[in-house]
Amino acid sequence: MARLKVLIVEDERTISDVLVYNLTEFGFEVQAATNGLEGIDRAKRFLPDVILLDVMLPGMDGLEVCRQLRAGAETKASKIIMLTAKSEEADQLVGFNVGADDYVTKPFSVRVLIERIKSITRRTSADDEPLESILVYGSISIDRTKHRVVVDNEHVLLTASEFRLLETLLRNPGRVYDRTELIESALGADTLVLERTIDVHIRSLRKKLGRYADRIETVRGVGYRFRELQEESNE
Ligand code: CA
């Protein structure tokens, strides 16, 4: 069976890289473009089944790209899923009626996105692979089934405790966890550990996250949180 073709039009390298990696891994045939004109050009030649289209693009914005794709003879059949930064942008999409088929709000999980892609193309083949439980944040992705963490397309080796700590923090970015909560979720409630143990694990986890070390913020007097992507990326 021919693989489903997905074109990603996204100027943010980190997001694009993570999508290319995970969607290819899932079994889709993937191409990527970093701006609207390149996106339209690629769409004409690649004839993707699905186009993941970022709203905020340099130059021609995603809404205009969407209109042109819809108007193009070669591209009007492609399904378009808009990637929006805020729910207000999603409202705009509906308001402007640009012809998108669906949208997802950032940050999104790859699992959700794959589900949307599958449902939009209405493929219900029996040999579909089971969905993997992948949680993605920027260019960090963690695969809960395989217990694997990928940062900037490189595998990072974490201990079981570090993995659970990262998973807990990433599940609710921005939320502050106190040390007791982290001990319960990462080490198990029945483990007798000093609160300081968490600090040791966090220190080691930060070291392994390299340039993302400071994403895990110390909240003085309370605990830790994973800093939200929107707090620094501003498109
Ligand atoms: Ca963007």
Image (tube, helix red, strand yellow):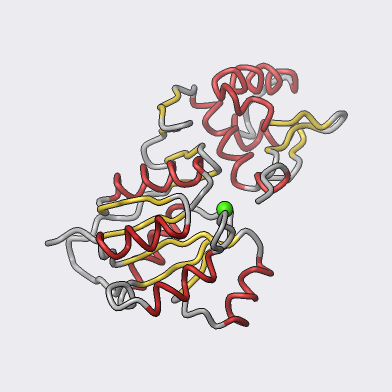
Q: Is residue 147 left or right of residue 75?
A: right
Location of residue 45 by image quarter:
bottom left
Q: Quadrant of residue 86?
A: bottom right
| Of residues 167 and 63, the one drawn nearer to the viewer in this rendering | 63
Q: Is residue 66 above or below residue 209?
A: below
Q: Quadrant of the N terminus?
A: bottom left
At x 47% / y 54%, what residue is drawn? 35
Q: Position of residue 144 (x, y in %)?
A: 44, 41
Q: Nearer the viewer, residue 207 or 11?
A: 11
**Residue at image location 58% in from the left, 75% down from the top:** 93
Relative height, residue 66 to residue 177 (above, below): below
Q: Is residue 21 left or right of residue 199?
A: left
Tell me where residue 113 appears, x and y as whole percent.
44, 59
Which residue shows up at 58% across the image and 62% down it? 84
Residue drawn at the location 65% of the way across and 48% of the way down: 172
Q: In the image, residue 66 lies at what x, y percent?
A: 47, 71
Q: Residue furthest right?
A: 221
Task: Please state which of residues 172 and 94 is positioned toward the viewer in this rendering.
Answer: 94
Which residue is outermost to the left? 1
